[in-house]
């Protein structure tokens, strides 16, 4: 069984980078699955992210000693004390690959281009070591694509995946006598989806990763993802929902009709509404009793609601 991080290039030799939020449903499913498997207390063990100085891989550091050092940073961050990473390089389609066996020794292959360009070695290793972590947890989603999205989401939410977003950049490329722009990224999430998961993490742990980004394109993607996260916090029946959303919610509640993300049921005790927690997307079910405060039973987030 192997895990890998996807390379995408725009320009010579590659296809266009996808933007927006095409995988949002799977990302939200991954966040729920991660919280269910780890619990709120387990997730809080990752309140500190991998710091830039630990992930940095300077050009004057020995290649093989340096890559082992960075791999160990990821192992220690994910609290895999008995996992040993043996890292090598070769030419291949993907940026990285790991063989998932019983352990404790895991063989990680990185694309040979990382020998010359070390900027994203830590990002590729964050993805591959997260495969090991999820394998040990026994956590996966059906299908290769969804499982890779889970890996990116988990790496990002647990504090190592900001490096994957920072790998998104535009560089100048020289073709003959012409200079063009080449866009480059790692991972299966779009840049904006990485930003979205980082914003969820930032809200949970009062963390702002923006100063860590070296890539201006990563900053823009993070801000776009954060805007989408803030929109989640304004969805009815949350009390911060805007007037237009509140008006539709009230109309749907009277008719017991489903709306964007919420649904109503009626029983002898009165109407109840179910809706996703905006942080972990566990569905909550509460009586329709006006303004209330509630705590998500999965992630522990406190919510102000107008049901």
Image (spheres, grey):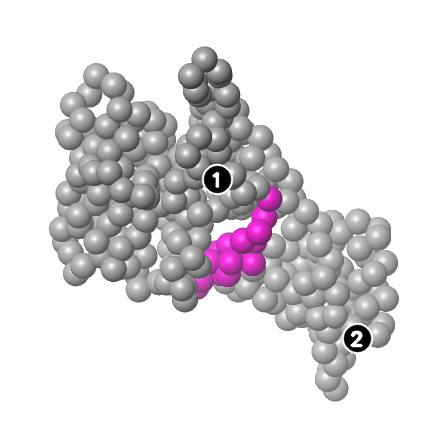
Q: Which residue is mark 2?
A: 256
Secondary structure found at label 1: loop
Query: Can the viewer see residue 62 in this picture?
Result: yes
Residue 277 vertical placement versus 18 (above, below)? below
| Residue drawn at x 85%, y 72% as measured from the top left | 254
Q: Residue furthest front?
A: 176
Q: Position of residue 97 (x, y in %)?
A: 26, 47
| Residue drawn at x 17%, y 50% as measured from the top left | 106
Q: Nearer the viewer, residue 165 or 145?
A: 145
Main SS, magenta region, reads helix
Measure the C-alpha gap from mark 1 to mark 2. Answer: 46 Å
232 displayed left or right of 188: right
Q: Please give the range of residues in magenta.
A: 20-36
Q: Is residue 150 magenta?
A: no
Q: Nearer the viewer, residue 86 or 12?
A: 12
Q: Position of residue 25 (x, y in %)?
A: 56, 58
Residue 96 vertical placement versus 146 (above, below)? above
233 displayed left or right of 71: right
Image mark count: 2
| Numbered tag placed on residue 27 in the rendering | none
Q: Which residue is mark 1?
A: 15
Query: Can the viewer see residue 44 in this picture?
Result: no
Q: Quadrant of the N terminus?
A: bottom left
């Amino acid at each position: 069984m192997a895990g890998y991080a996807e390379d995408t290039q725009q320009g010579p030799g590659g296809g266009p980078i996808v933007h927006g939020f095409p995988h949002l449903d799977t990302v939200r499913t991954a966040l729920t699955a991660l919280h269910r498997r780890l619990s709120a207390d387990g997730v809080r063990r990752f309140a500190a992210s991998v710091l830039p100085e630990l992930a940095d891989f300077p050009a004057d550091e020995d290649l093989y000693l340096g890559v082992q050092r960075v791999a160990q940073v990821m192992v220690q961050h994910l609290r895999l004390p008995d996992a040993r990473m043996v890292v090598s390089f070769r030419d291949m389609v993907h940026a990285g690959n790991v063989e998932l066996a019983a352990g404790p020794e895991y063989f990680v292959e990185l694309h040979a281009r990382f020998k010359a360009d070390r900027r994203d070695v830590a990002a590729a290793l964050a993805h591959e070591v997260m495969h090991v972590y999820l394998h040990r947890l026994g956590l996966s989603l059906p299908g290769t694509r969804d499982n890779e999205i889970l890996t990116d989401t988990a790496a990002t939410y647990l504090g190592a995946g900001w490096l994957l977003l920072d790998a998104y950049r535009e560089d100048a490329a020289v073709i003959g006598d012409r200079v063009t722009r080449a866009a480059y990224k790692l991972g299966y999430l779009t840049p904006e989806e990485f930003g979205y998961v980082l914003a969820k993490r930032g809200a949970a742990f009062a963390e702002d990763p923006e100063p860590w980004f070296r890539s201006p394109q990563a900053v823009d993607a993070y801000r776009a993802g954060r805007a989408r996260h803030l929109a989640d916090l304004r969805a009815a029946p949350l009390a911060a929902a805007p007037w237009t959303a509140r008006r539709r919610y009230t109309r749907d509640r009277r008719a017991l009709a489903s709306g964007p993300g919420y649904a109503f049921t009626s029983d002898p005790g009165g109407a109840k509404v179910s809706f996703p927690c905006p942080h972990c997307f566990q569905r909550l079910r509460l009586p329709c009793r006006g303004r209330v405060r509630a705590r998500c039973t999965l992630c522990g987030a406190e919510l102000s609601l107008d049901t």
